[in-house]
Amino acid sequence: MFNVAILGYRHQGSRHHAPSFARLPDCRIVAVCDIVPERAREGGERYRVPSYTNADEMLDKEQIDIVNLPVGEKYRYDLLMKCFQRGKHVFTEKPLLGELGQFRIRPSDIPPSRALIDEWRKRGVAFGMCFCLHGAANVRRAKEVIRSGCLGPVRMIIGRCAQGSWNHLIDMVRFLGGEVAEVTAFSDDPERMPNKAACLRFESGAIGSLCVASNLSLQYEIKWIGQAGEIAVANIAGTATWRLHNSLDVTHWNNQGQLEPDTYHGLFEAHIADFVASIRDGRPFDADGWAALRHMEIDAAITESIQSGKPAKVERYRPEHGRTIFTQSLPCEGSRPSQGP
């Protein structure tokens, strides 16, 4: 049984993360911490566990295996360091960091992000990022189809989304398309960047694009085009559609017609369950610390290109690390089996 502490009990922590951990049969919540006493007390009462307003006190006093850390990206660095230095597994929200917020990642956010990755790697613990599209049923189905090889190697990938899905879209396009080498990006407002578009050149030679609009109604849409066929996935409660280029037969897979509250909760639960299982089994997790850093490096390059008006290289720290859909099974980076069933 894994002992889980909730460090941050605002909207994401109280409505999505904590309930997801609580529903897993091999996890139990043992403490809740929030700097706002009322929120900490609410979480403690809900799960009948001690509540804290000081992270150090909770981390030092309680027996904890996993720290769930759904606090804002601006406040995350110090808390992540505290958890890693105490040898705790961590599951946190996206993006990894962001001094100006999650939709304005800058090159200056990269050095502290790399420092966090260095600390994580030293400690031999698991680090999971809430890129929860990996838990979506239509994305899992798309992964199976692409991995089967029937669509051939990727040649192009196109993604667009509403602003709230921007970080998820970057992560998913990278995971499905491979590592990105260079971007050329534009925005109608280079300072705030509410609407932006980027052309991508992948290291494999494939090309692609990412677009985000602040007032777009859809959640996201990704089209993956291979040498032999193509597949499209759309929306959280979504669909997957694929076909071979030389065939008129189209396969439609539909998970759900509309986004219900249970669908959104289920997305978190499936993703968190996979994170916990990766610790238990000592295996890789798709949305690990390297995925968190790779997202930051791509997003920062997009900002650099927008503000400079020039293409920007995506500089990858320790480029030999990081999982994509093309990665073969490898020993679990930064993870070890821990206490559990």
Image (spheres, rainbow, N blue to C red):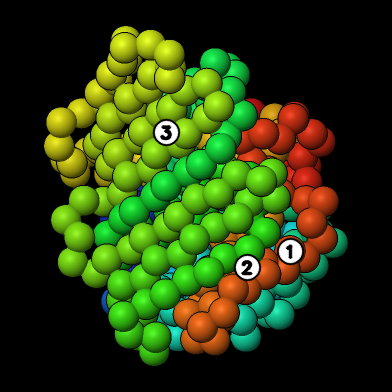
Q: Position of residue 258 (x, y in %)?
A: 15, 37
| Numbered circle sitting on residue 316 | 1
- At horizontal 46% and vertical 64% (from top left) the residue drawn is 198
Q: Position of residue 168 (x, y in %)?
A: 43, 54
Residue 165, compared with residue 313, is above or below; it is above
Per the model, the C-alpha gap separating discs 2 and 3 is: 23 Å
Residue 64, compared with residue 106, is above or below; it is above
Choose top left, top right, bottom left or bottom right for residue 318.
bottom right
| Numbered circle sitting on residue 139 | 3
- The answer to whether the residues at label 1 and label 2 have Cβ atoms under 8 Å apart is yes
| Label 2 packing within 10 angstroms: few (<14), some (14-19), many (20+) | many
Per the model, the C-alpha gap separating discs 1 and 2 is: 7 Å
Which of 25 and 205 lies nearest the eye of the viewer?
205
Which of 328 and 93 lies nearest the eye of the viewer?
328
Q: What residue type is labelled 3?
A: Val
> Circle 1 sits in a helix, a strand or a loop, which is it?
loop
Name the residue beneath numbered marker 2.
Answer: 297
Q: In this image, 11 relative to 122: left or right?
A: left
Residue 244 visible in the snapshot: yes
> Circle 3 sits in a helix, a strand or a loop, which is it?
helix
- At horizontal 42% and vertical 33% (from top left) the residue drawn is 139
- Which of label 3 and label 1 is nearer to you? 1
- At horizontal 75% and vertical 29% (from top left) the residue drawn is 329
